[in-house]
Amino acid sequence: MDCPSEENLIRMKLDGISSIANLDFDIPNRKLTVFHSGEIDQIEKSVIELNLGGKKISTEQTDQTEFKENTNQKKLLWSVLAINFAFFIIEMTTGIVSKSMGLVADSLDMLADSFVYGISLFAVGGTIVKKKRIAKLAGYFQITLAIIGFVEVLRRFFGDEKLPDFSTMIIVSIFALIANGICLYILQKSKSKEEAHMKASMIFTSNDVIINLGVIIAGILVNWLSSSKPDLIIGTIVFALVIQGAFRILKLSK
């Protein structure tokens, strides 16, 4: 290996081999250490097929089950989980008080993200197949929350709802935007961001940034038009984005 692109190529080639527990790349010395269970034949064959001059140097038994990369992943995921769950509570509370469907919708999205990061923690150190299964579970969970959200939007649209507090919508969403920006930065620092469960986390967080901007715009329109419709519209868009993100996750899990 002489560059990160070759590392990504090897990772994609070995993707799907369930016996692999961890890949340790030493790019300067052109070495790859594969921690796995069972026979090495399939792994060796896959690496050789890349025509990068790969060959097996040695193989030995080890009792190592914890890896530095996995520890770093856990720290990152715990950080973004704490941020998202805190803002779930903040946005749900302020959303109910201010009667903003946009904030309530975003809070549910934050809760969904918290679950995604939580189950991603269970995936750390697991096989690639296990990680894809967890990404799949996360996708279906998002779809379930989105459907519940759509039902609530319809109820409010046809009901007699009070005008949301636009200032609360804007202020809380600005803080949520900052929090999601921090989460995205933290996730981007991960060396394992190409793995399915980490990709799932970044997709959800990227959607959140867009959603926060949408709620801010909706708050401005609520004040300008003296109507709750912009808030309900952004709520609908939020859940549509949640479903879109969920399908992207399900695609990753195949």
Image: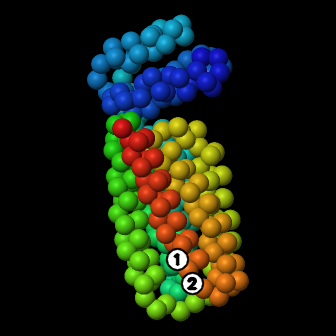
Q: Quadrant of residue 1?
A: top right
Secondary structure, mark 2, is: loop
Q: Position of residue 34 (x, y in %)?
A: 44, 24
Q: Position of residue 251 (x, y in %)?
A: 41, 42
Judge whether 8 appears above or below 124 on screen: above
Judge whether 43 appears above or below 135 on screen: above
**Residue 116 in view in this figure:** no
Secondary structure, mark 1, is: helix
**Residue 220 in view in this figure:** yes
Q: Position of residue 134 (x, y in %)?
A: 36, 48
Q: Looking at the image, which residue is at 48% across and 39% down? A: 195
Q: Looking at the image, which residue is at 69% across and 78% down? A: 220
Residue tagged by mark 2?
A: 228
Left or right relative to 198: residue 187: right
Q: Looking at the image, which residue is at 50% across and 22% down? A: 10
Cβ–Cβ under 8 Å for marks 2 and 1:
yes
Residue occupying the far left of the picture: 38
Left or right relative to 200: residue 168: right
* Amino acid residing under circle 1: Leu
> What count of labels does the image hold?
2
Q: Which mark is residue 232?
A: 1
- Please state which of residues 32 and 247 is positioned toward the viewer in this rendering: 247
Judge whether 171 appears above or below 131 on screen: below
- Within 10 Å of the Cα at label 2, are there few (<14), some (14-19), or many (20+) other Cα atoms? many
- Please state which of residues 249 and 85 is positioned toward the viewer in this rendering: 249
- Distance from disc 2 to disc 1, alpha carbons, whole Å, reads 7 Å
- Within 10 Å of the Cα at label 1, are there few (<14), some (14-19), or many (20+) other Cα atoms? many
Q: Quadrant of residue 133?
A: top left
User: Which quadrant, please, contains the C terminus?
Assistant: top left
Q: Looking at the image, which residue is at 56% across and 24% down? A: 7
Q: Position of residue 194 (x, y in %)?
A: 53, 37
Judge whether 51 appears above or below 234 on screen: above
